[in-house]
């Protein structure tokens, strides 16, 4: 074994060195089968994306804060970065049953670890149906020299607990806390906040298989657009790490007002649109149903 001080300092169990076992290249575990209900009908969602629609609501999420809004089924809604680069932590629930909520891990498996147009954000078990289908993404397919890609399901929200573990400080500015405050008026609590989609956030895995984040590339005109498959409660947090160009773990907590991190924190927007001719555009659309699993996990009745 060669000496490897880099391995030690990387604090990873993984090695950057690959071993050849003469295996054939594995294929993606999940892929479209004919007639698959998993993957979006591109013709239909292109029609939705291009159809005339009217803006019915517009919300601004102030820097380092969170908001939650109700979005009716069959709406199209956009997340925007109206003043430039800013990372957005997104949570989604079925408005009528908050036990049904976004499941990042399954969405990552069914589509890809970073998501874009035509991918869907799926709900957890025992529901497993699309909450939204992505209809437009101005940053789509961005893939940089470090393997960084945009709109991340690998990571999760920043939170005060991991911050305290790392920094020893009680810091209140985190996406988990923003999302918690945002959903309280809707009858939800901290326990309802779940793993997020990190919209506008560039992430990847390095040669040690470790998660990394890069600065947000969004500009004032960028947006990420989704079609609401159900009546939804959608919460977003304008990450207190801002555009992630200056993020840190408590280093500036004593002098937060002087911190460079504040300079890179910007607002986010949510714009909700209604299709002008819903009936015609959605002729081929069906409201998503629960998966019809009829077993009972192998449990037998008395
Ligand atoms: Zn955050």
Image (tube, grey):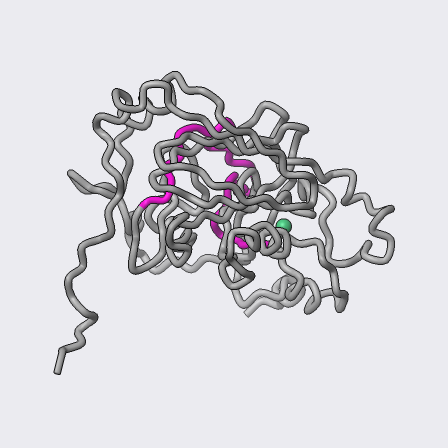
Query: Which x, y percent locates residue 284?
Result: 21, 28
Identify which residue is drawn at 14% across, 78% down.
300
Is 145 magenta? The answer is yes
Q: Determine the residue positioned at 62% across, 54% down.
A: 181
**Is 66 located above or below residue 41 in the figure?**
below
- Return the residue nearer the eye: 274 or 205: 274
Q: Nearer the viewer, residue 280 or 11?
A: 280
Residue 156 in which image quadrant? bottom right
What x and y, as percent, mark residue 162? 64, 64
If the image is split into quadrants, where does the C terminus sit?
A: bottom left
Residue drawn at x 81%, y 43% as measured from the top left = 260
The x and y percentages for residue 212 are 59, 50
Left or right of 43, for residue 109 = right
Residue extending farthest top? 52
Question: As drawn, which residue projects farthest toward the bottom?
Answer: 302
Q: Please provide the residue range marked out in magenta.
A: 130-157
Please state which of residues 277 and 134 is positioned toward the viewer in this rendering.
277
The x and y percentages for residue 187 are: 51, 56
Going by the image, does 135 lie left or right of 3? left
Can residue 159 be seen here? The reply is yes
Left or right? Give the position of 155 relative to 115.
right
> Quadrant of residue 242 in the image?
top right
Whether residue 206 is visible, yes or no, is no
In depth, the one of 230 and 203 nearer the eye is: 230
Name the residue at 42% across, 43% down.
232
Is the N terminus in the top left, top right, bottom left or bottom right quadrant?
Answer: bottom right
Look at the image and say whether residue 77 sits in the magenta stretch: no
């Amino acid at each position: 074994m060669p000496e490897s001080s880099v391995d030690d300092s990387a604090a990873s169990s993984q090695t950057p060195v690959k071993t050849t076992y003469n295996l054939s290249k594995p294929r993606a575990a999940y892929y479209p089968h004919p007639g698959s209900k998993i993957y979006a009908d591109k013709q239909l969602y292109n029609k939705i994306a291009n159809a005339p629609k009217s803006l019915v609501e517009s919300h601004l999420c102030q820097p380092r804060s969170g908001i939650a809004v109700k979005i009716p089924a069959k709406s199209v809604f956009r997340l925007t970065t109206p003043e430039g680069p800013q990372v957005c932590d997104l949570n989604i629930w079925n408005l009528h049953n908050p036990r049904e909520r976004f499941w990042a891990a399954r969405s990552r498996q069914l589509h890809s670890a970073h998501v874009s147009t035509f991918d869907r954000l799926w709900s957890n078990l025992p529901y497993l149906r699309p909450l939204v289908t992505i209809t437009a993404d101005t940053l789509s397919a961005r893939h940089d020299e470090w393997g960084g890609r945009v709109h991340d399901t690998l990571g999760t929200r920043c939170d005060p607990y991991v911050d305290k573990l790392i920094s020893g400080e009680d810091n209140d500015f985190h996406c988990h806390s923003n999302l918690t405050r945002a959903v309280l008026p809707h009858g939800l609590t901290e326990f309802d906040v779940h793993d997020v989609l990190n919209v506008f956030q560039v992430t990847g895995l390095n040669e040690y298989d470790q998660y990394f984040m890069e600065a947000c590339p969004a500009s004032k005109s960028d947006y990420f657009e989704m079609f609401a498959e159900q009546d939804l409660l959608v919460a977003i947090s304008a990450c207190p790490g801002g555009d992630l160009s200056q993020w840190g773990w408590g280093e500036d907590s004593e002098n937060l007002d002087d911190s460079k991190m504040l300079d890179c924190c910007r607002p986010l927007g949510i714009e909700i649109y209604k299709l002008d001719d819903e009936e015609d555009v959605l002729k081929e659309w069906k409201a998503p149903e629960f998966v019809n699993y009829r077993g009972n996990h192998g449990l037998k009745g008395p």
